[in-house]
């Protein structure tokens, strides 16, 4: 037996403490104990049957990816699947082995399903539209009359898009009952080389509907979206000059004027919470330093004054006063925090390895970032830190290079770039590192930004 020494005991205690610390951090973000929900496949009547598979896949994934529920395995579902509340019939004596009787609430609340909630219904064709009749029941209730949580009708076009639409809407209503924001309608902007040059692309939150947004046919990188979702800023090498900041309207697609000060580099722009100002890095002084300007580039103010490279400023979306940024002022690049006027500079990461890509969560309390201080030395992994306490937890490990985290609008999900599959692609995950989903596959895709 291996001798247990004092240093070993201290190391074990530290590891346990770190694990508990990490659990506390992600628990505050994604929540604790989860209710169990059952979602049997819906049926489709008429032409709606052609699109019910898309509906079922979308609804199940929306609920599963939200990270709110424990999903009851479909292999455990009873044979009798209700389509309407009228299908439930209370037996005189409940017998779980009787498979010939009508559905009842206990079929879903008792083992082997053991669910708390049941989403059920059906789709039909009506006036050349797809119509969803959807219900959510609390199957722990003793009677059908007290079980209904949601009973609603949804309409969409009679096609795949319509099936996805009504599924998203039903999922949104379910999640609202538990105080969780649906990601339906949110977008992810990212950099892709699939068209032959690095351009900005956009896709839906689940990886569907991928479209090219810019057509500069040149090197474009570091996208950032204004808080109101109307403008996109990015760094461009267009025209053969050094990197400069370009802004586009997301409503019209047109370029918006922005004055770049004379410098070999103007880059990594981000918007203030009110969208009226931009903070970015510029080498106008010789070193890459942080500056703040109006949204058109006017009224320039210098925020940092060091002989080191300082980039990637990100402004607290809640307070509008704190800035996260990356600096080499103390040696290898680390993540720092300062006030918006440049005062009260504090290093947040420990100084080990290299740290980069800080991103505030929507609540302005935690940051996600990339760090080489992981279980894979020399490689980049994703971490989350409570900015107030500086407690942190590692989300990725032993799976290639993971960078560029960006928070979803719900504050519970993160999108990253990772080369874990061989090429760099965009992945989403719950903020505890689970439910990893690959969203892109064509070309090389990186630097995602998730926005409403």
Image (spheres, helix red, strand yellow):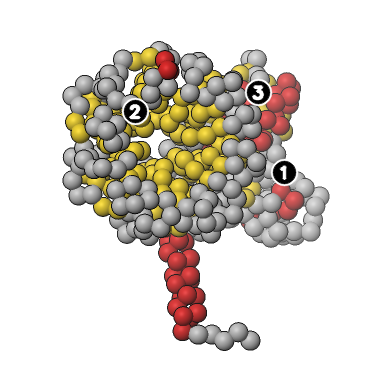
User: Where is residue 8 drawn, in percent x and y?
Assistant: 50, 79
Q: Residues within 10 Å of mark 3 (few under 14, many from 20)?
A: some
Q: Earlier in the sequence, mark 3 or mark 1?
A: 1
Badge 3 is on which residue? Answer: 160
Q: Where 44 sits versus 409, above or below?
A: above
Q: Nearer the viewer, mark 3 or mark 2?
A: 2
Q: Secondary structure at mark 1?
A: loop
Q: Secondary structure at mark 2?
A: loop
276 on left or right of 198:
left
Residue drawn at x 18%, y 40% as measured from the top left = 341
17 on left or right of 72:
left
Badge 2 is on which residue? Answer: 265
- Mark 3 to mark 1: distance in Å? 24 Å
Badge 1 is on which residue? Answer: 81
Q: Earlier in the sequence, mark 3 or mark 2?
A: 3
Q: Residues within 10 Å of mark 2 (few under 14, many from 20)?
A: many
Q: Secondary structure at mark 3?
A: helix
Q: Where 25 sits versus 244, above or below?
A: below
204 on left or right of 284:
right
């Amino acid at each position: 037996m291996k001798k247990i020494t004092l240093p070993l005991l201290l190391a074990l205690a530290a590891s346990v403490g770190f694990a508990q610390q990490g659990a506390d951090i992600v628990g505050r973000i994604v929540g604790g104990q989860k209710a169990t929900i059952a979602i049997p496949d819906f049926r489709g009547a008429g032409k709606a049957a052609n699109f019910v598979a898309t509906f079922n896949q979308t609804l199940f994934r929306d609920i599963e990816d939200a990270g709110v529920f424990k999903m009851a395995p479909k292999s455990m579902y009873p044979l009798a699947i209700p389509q309407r509340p009228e299908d439930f019939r209370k037996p005189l004596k409940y017998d779980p082995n009787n498979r010939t009787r009508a559905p009842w609430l206990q079929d879903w609340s008792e083992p082997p399903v053991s669910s708390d909630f049941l989403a059920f219904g059906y789709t039909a064709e009506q006036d050349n539209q797809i119509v969803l009749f959807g219900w959510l029941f609390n199957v722990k209730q003793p009677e059908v009359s007290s079980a209904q949580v949601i009973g609603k009708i949804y309409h969409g076009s009679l096609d795949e898009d319509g099936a996805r639409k009504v599924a998203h809407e039903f999922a949104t209503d379910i999640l609202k009952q538990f105080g969780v924001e649906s990601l339906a309608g949110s977008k992810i902007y990212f950099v892709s080389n699939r068209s032959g040059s690095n351009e900005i692309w956009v896709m839906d939150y689940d990886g569907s509907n991928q479209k090219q947004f810019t057509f500069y046919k040149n090197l474009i990188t570091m996208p950032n979206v204004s808080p109101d979702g109307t403008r996109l800023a990015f760094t461009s090498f267009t025209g053969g000059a050094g990197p400069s900041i370009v802004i586009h309207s997301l409503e019209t697609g047109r370029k918006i004027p922005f004055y770049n000060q004379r410098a070999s580099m103007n880059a990594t722009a981000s918007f203030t919470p009110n969208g009226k100002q931009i903070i970015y890095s510029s080498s106008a002084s010789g070193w890459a330093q942080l500056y703040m300007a109006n949204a058109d580039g006017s009224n320039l103010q210098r925020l940092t004054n060091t002989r080191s490279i300082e980039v990637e400023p990100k402004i607290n979306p809640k307070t509008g006063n704190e800035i996260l940024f990356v600096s080499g002022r103390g040696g290898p690049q680390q993540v720092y925090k300062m006030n918006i006027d440049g005062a009260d500079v504090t290093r947040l990461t420990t100084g080990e390895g290299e740290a980069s890509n800080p991103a505030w969560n929507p609540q302005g309390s935690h940051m996600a970032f990339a760090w080489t201080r992981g279980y894979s030395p020399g490689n980049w992994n994703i971490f989350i830190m409570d900015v107030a306490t500086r407690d942190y937890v590692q989300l990725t490990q032993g799976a290639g290079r993971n960078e560029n985290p960006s928070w979803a609008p719900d504050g519970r999900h993160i999108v990253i770039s990772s080369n874990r599959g061989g090429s760099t692609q965009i992945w989403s995950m719950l903020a505890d590192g689970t439910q990893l989903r690959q969203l892109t596959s064509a070309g090389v895709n990186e630097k995602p930004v998730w926005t409403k």
